[in-house]
Image (spheres, grey):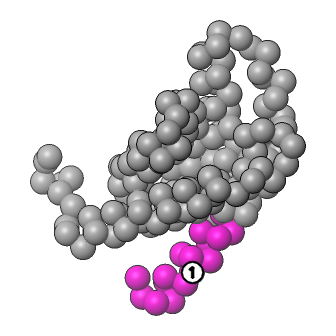
Protein backbone atom coordinates (compact mmCIF):
# COMPACT_ATOMS: atom_id res chain seq x y z
CA UNK A 1 0.00 0.00 0.00
CA UNK A 2 1.43 3.41 -0.90
CA UNK A 3 1.94 6.02 1.82
CA UNK A 4 -1.16 8.00 0.85
CA UNK A 5 -3.29 4.85 1.32
CA UNK A 6 -2.16 4.02 4.85
CA UNK A 7 -5.01 4.25 7.29
CA UNK A 8 -4.32 5.48 10.82
CA UNK A 9 -5.37 2.96 13.48
CA UNK A 10 -8.17 5.20 14.78
CA UNK A 11 -9.66 5.61 11.31
CA UNK A 12 -9.30 1.90 10.55
CA UNK A 13 -11.08 1.14 13.82
CA UNK A 14 -13.92 3.51 12.87
CA UNK A 15 -14.28 1.82 9.48
CA UNK A 16 -14.27 -1.63 11.10
CA UNK A 17 -16.93 -0.53 13.58
CA UNK A 18 -19.07 0.95 10.80
CA UNK A 19 -18.76 -2.31 8.89
CA UNK A 20 -19.82 -4.26 11.98
CA UNK A 21 -22.80 -1.96 12.53
CA UNK A 22 -23.83 -2.34 8.88
CA UNK A 23 -23.58 -6.14 9.20
CA UNK A 24 -25.63 -6.17 12.38
CA UNK A 25 -28.31 -4.04 10.72
CA UNK A 26 -28.22 -6.32 7.65
CA UNK A 27 -28.65 -9.49 9.74
CA UNK A 28 -31.49 -7.95 11.74
CA UNK A 29 -33.21 -6.85 8.54
CA UNK A 30 -32.97 -10.43 7.21
CA UNK A 31 -35.30 -11.40 10.06
CA UNK A 32 -37.96 -8.82 9.19
CA UNK A 33 -40.77 -10.25 7.04
CA UNK A 34 -41.29 -8.62 3.63
CA UNK A 35 -42.95 -5.22 3.87
CA UNK A 36 -44.73 -5.54 0.54
CA UNK A 37 -46.08 -8.31 -1.67
CA UNK A 38 -43.40 -7.40 -4.21
CA UNK A 39 -40.33 -9.59 -3.63
CA UNK A 40 -37.00 -7.82 -3.23
CA UNK A 41 -38.35 -4.56 -1.88
CA UNK A 42 -36.89 -3.84 1.53
CA UNK A 43 -35.72 -0.83 3.47
CA UNK A 44 -32.02 -1.57 3.04
CA UNK A 45 -31.24 -0.19 6.47
CA UNK A 46 -27.55 -1.11 6.21
CA UNK A 47 -27.34 1.53 3.50
CA UNK A 48 -27.59 4.17 6.23
CA UNK A 49 -23.97 3.27 6.92
CA UNK A 50 -23.13 3.37 3.20
CA UNK A 51 -24.53 6.88 2.83
CA UNK A 52 -22.79 7.97 6.03
CA UNK A 53 -19.46 6.65 4.71
CA UNK A 54 -19.91 8.34 1.32
CA UNK A 55 -20.23 11.70 3.09
CA UNK A 56 -17.72 11.25 5.90
CA UNK A 57 -14.91 9.16 4.40
CA UNK A 58 -12.81 8.93 1.27
CA UNK A 59 -14.43 7.09 -1.66
CA UNK A 60 -12.14 4.07 -1.41
CA UNK A 61 -12.79 3.81 2.33
CA UNK A 62 -16.54 3.81 1.74
CA UNK A 63 -16.02 1.16 -0.95
CA UNK A 64 -14.08 -1.04 1.48
CA UNK A 65 -16.83 -0.83 4.10
CA UNK A 66 -19.47 -1.74 1.51
CA UNK A 67 -17.38 -4.55 -0.02
CA UNK A 68 -16.72 -6.20 3.34
CA UNK A 69 -20.38 -5.83 4.30
CA UNK A 70 -21.51 -7.42 1.05
CA UNK A 71 -19.09 -10.35 1.28
CA UNK A 72 -19.66 -11.15 4.95
CA UNK A 73 -23.38 -10.39 4.65
CA UNK A 74 -23.67 -13.00 1.89
CA UNK A 75 -22.17 -15.53 4.30
CA UNK A 76 -24.86 -14.67 6.84
CA UNK A 77 -27.55 -14.92 4.18
CA UNK A 78 -26.03 -18.25 3.04
CA UNK A 79 -26.67 -17.50 -0.60
CA UNK A 80 -24.36 -16.94 -3.56
CA UNK A 81 -27.09 -14.99 -5.32
CA UNK A 82 -27.04 -12.55 -2.39
CA UNK A 83 -23.42 -11.64 -3.10
CA UNK A 84 -24.07 -11.35 -6.84
CA UNK A 85 -27.09 -9.06 -6.52
CA UNK A 86 -25.79 -7.12 -3.52
CA UNK A 87 -22.40 -6.55 -5.12
CA UNK A 88 -23.82 -5.39 -8.44
CA UNK A 89 -26.30 -3.09 -6.71
CA UNK A 90 -23.74 -1.75 -4.25
CA UNK A 91 -21.18 -1.11 -6.99
CA UNK A 92 -23.56 0.87 -9.16
CA UNK A 93 -24.88 2.69 -6.08
CA UNK A 94 -21.37 3.78 -5.06
CA UNK A 95 -20.40 4.67 -8.64
CA UNK A 96 -23.38 7.03 -8.63
CA UNK A 97 -23.45 8.40 -5.09
CA UNK A 98 -19.75 9.21 -4.76
CA UNK A 99 -19.57 11.55 -7.78
CA UNK A 100 -23.02 13.03 -7.10
CA UNK A 101 -22.06 13.83 -3.49
CA UNK A 102 -18.81 15.46 -4.66
CA UNK A 103 -20.12 17.31 -7.73
CA UNK A 104 -23.27 18.59 -6.01
CA UNK A 105 -22.28 19.26 -2.38
CA UNK A 106 -25.44 21.31 -1.76
CA UNK A 107 -27.70 18.44 -2.85
CA UNK A 108 -29.46 17.07 0.23
CA UNK A 109 -28.07 13.79 1.52
CA UNK A 110 -31.48 12.16 1.19
CA UNK A 111 -31.60 13.06 -2.52
CA UNK A 112 -28.20 11.48 -3.11
CA UNK A 113 -29.36 8.43 -1.16
CA UNK A 114 -32.46 8.15 -3.35
CA UNK A 115 -30.27 8.25 -6.46
CA UNK A 116 -28.06 5.57 -4.93
CA UNK A 117 -31.05 3.37 -4.06
CA UNK A 118 -32.44 3.58 -7.59
CA UNK A 119 -28.99 2.79 -9.02
CA UNK A 120 -28.75 -0.14 -6.60
CA UNK A 121 -31.99 -1.53 -8.02
CA UNK A 122 -30.79 -1.00 -11.59
CA UNK A 123 -27.58 -2.87 -10.72
CA UNK A 124 -29.57 -5.76 -9.29
CA UNK A 125 -31.82 -5.97 -12.34
CA UNK A 126 -28.72 -5.89 -14.57
CA UNK A 127 -27.27 -8.81 -12.59
CA UNK A 128 -30.49 -10.78 -13.03
CA UNK A 129 -30.48 -10.08 -16.78
CA UNK A 130 -26.87 -11.25 -17.07
CA UNK A 131 -27.47 -14.28 -14.81
CA UNK A 132 -30.56 -15.55 -16.59
CA UNK A 133 -29.99 -14.10 -20.04
CA UNK A 134 -33.49 -12.70 -20.14
CA UNK A 135 -34.79 -9.17 -20.32
CA UNK A 136 -38.28 -10.06 -19.07
CA UNK A 137 -37.34 -8.99 -15.54
CA UNK A 138 -37.00 -5.39 -16.75
CA UNK A 139 -40.77 -4.98 -16.27
CA UNK A 140 -40.13 -5.39 -12.56
CA UNK A 141 -37.80 -2.36 -12.51
CA UNK A 142 -40.46 0.38 -12.09
CA UNK A 143 -41.74 -1.29 -8.92
CA UNK A 144 -38.21 -1.68 -7.57
CA UNK A 145 -37.46 1.95 -8.40
CA UNK A 146 -40.48 3.16 -6.45
CA UNK A 147 -39.35 1.02 -3.52
CA UNK A 148 -35.82 2.37 -3.98
CA UNK A 149 -37.01 5.98 -3.89
CA UNK A 150 -38.92 5.39 -0.67
CA UNK A 151 -36.15 3.40 1.02
CA UNK A 152 -33.47 5.80 -0.28
CA UNK A 153 -35.36 8.72 1.20
CA UNK A 154 -35.65 6.95 4.55
CA UNK A 155 -32.02 5.78 4.73
CA UNK A 156 -30.80 9.16 3.48
CA UNK A 157 -32.73 11.00 6.19
CA UNK A 158 -31.35 8.62 8.82
CA UNK A 159 -27.80 9.15 7.54
CA UNK A 160 -28.37 12.92 7.51
CA UNK A 161 -29.44 12.88 11.17
CA UNK A 162 -26.46 10.70 12.13
CA UNK A 163 -24.05 13.04 10.34
CA UNK A 164 -25.59 16.09 12.01
CA UNK A 165 -25.36 14.44 15.43
CA UNK A 166 -21.71 13.54 14.83
CA UNK A 167 -20.95 17.13 13.79
CA UNK A 168 -22.53 18.42 17.00
CA UNK A 169 -20.45 15.91 18.95
CA UNK A 170 -17.34 17.28 17.22
CA UNK A 171 -16.58 14.19 15.18
The quadrant holding residue 145 is top right
Task: Please name the residue shown 48% across and 47% down the image.
Answer: 76
User: Above or below — where is 69 with respect to 108?
Assistant: above
User: Above or below — where is 160 with respect to 169?
Assistant: above
Viewer-closest of 125 and 167: 125
Callout 1: SS:
helix
Whether 124 is among the magenta residues is: no
The quadrant holding residue 37 is top right
Q: Residues within 10 Å of mark 1 (few under 14, many from 20)?
A: few
User: Above or below — where is 129 with respect to 31?
Assistant: above
Residue identifier under label 1: 164
Provide the residue span drawn in magenta.
Answer: 156-171
**Where residue 148 appears, x then y in whole percent?**
74, 47
Task: Please name the residue shown 49% across and 82% down the image.
Answer: 166
Task: Please name the residue shown 50% across and 30% down the image.
Answer: 80
**Predominant SS along the magenta part:** helix
Residue sticking out furthest to the bottom: 169
Task: Please name the residue shown 41% across and 60% down the image.
Answer: 19
- In this rendering, would 158 be left or right of 137? left
**Where residue 168 appears, x then y in whole percent?**
51, 89
**Where residue 134 appears, x then y in whole percent?**
71, 11
**Where residue 65 appears, x then y in whole percent?**
40, 54
Whether 163 is among the magenta residues is: yes
Camera sees residue 113? no
Amino acid sequence: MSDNRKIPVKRLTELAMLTAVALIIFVIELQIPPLTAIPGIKLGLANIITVYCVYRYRPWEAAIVVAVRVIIGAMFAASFSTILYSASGALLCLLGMIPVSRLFPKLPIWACSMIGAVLHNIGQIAAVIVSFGSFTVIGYLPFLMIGGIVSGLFTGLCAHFVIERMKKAGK
